[in-house]
Image (cartoon, rainbow, N blue to C red):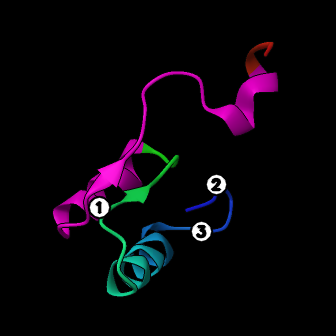
Amino acid sequence: MPWGQHANETEALRAAMGAMTAGAQSVYCGYSPHIVGALAREGVPVICHVGLVPPKATWTGG
């Protein structure tokens, strides 16, 4: 789920459910913990990481 394409948890959930319906086993989500939690509560396996968020790398000096 590319960063910046989903404005809220409803849009992110809709995209994740679409991916799961199309055969995905999980989704990668670089959004906030709030959105990751919303996906997880609905049973979507979410892959993410803690630490530097690549799209924001220049915000912290690269």
Question: Is 60 or 18 nearer to us in this picture?
Answer: 18
What residue would you read off at disc 2?
3
52 part of magenta stretch = yes
Give the image quarter of residue 43. bottom left
- Total marks placed: 3
Mark 1, secondary structure of its residue: helix
What amino acid is labelled 1 in the image?
A: Ala
Q: Secondary structure at mark 2?
A: loop
> Which residue: 78% across, 16% down?
62
Pointer 3: what residue? 6
The residue sitting at the top extreme is 61
Q: Which residue is mark 1?
A: 38
Mark 1 surroundings: few (<14), some (14-19) or many (≥20) residues within 10 A: some
Closer to us: 49 or 56: 49
Residue beneath the point at 60% across and 68% down: 7
Q: Position of residue 22 (x, y in %)?
A: 40, 86
Mark closest to the chain's N terminus, 3 or 1: 3
Camera-near label (2 vs 1) is: 2
Horizontal and vertical percent position of residue 11: 50, 77
- Residue type, label 2: Trp
Mark 3 secondary-structure assignment:
loop
Toward the viewer: 4 or 19? 19
Residue 39: horizontal and vertical position, in percent?
Answer: 30, 63
Q: Which residues are magenta?
A: 33-59
Residue 20, quarter of picture: bottom left
Q: Position of residue 40 (x, y in %)?
A: 23, 58
50 inside magenta stretch? yes
Residue type highlighted by circle 3: His
Q: Is residue 35 above or below residue 13?
A: above
Give the answer, above or below, for where 55 lies relative to 18. above
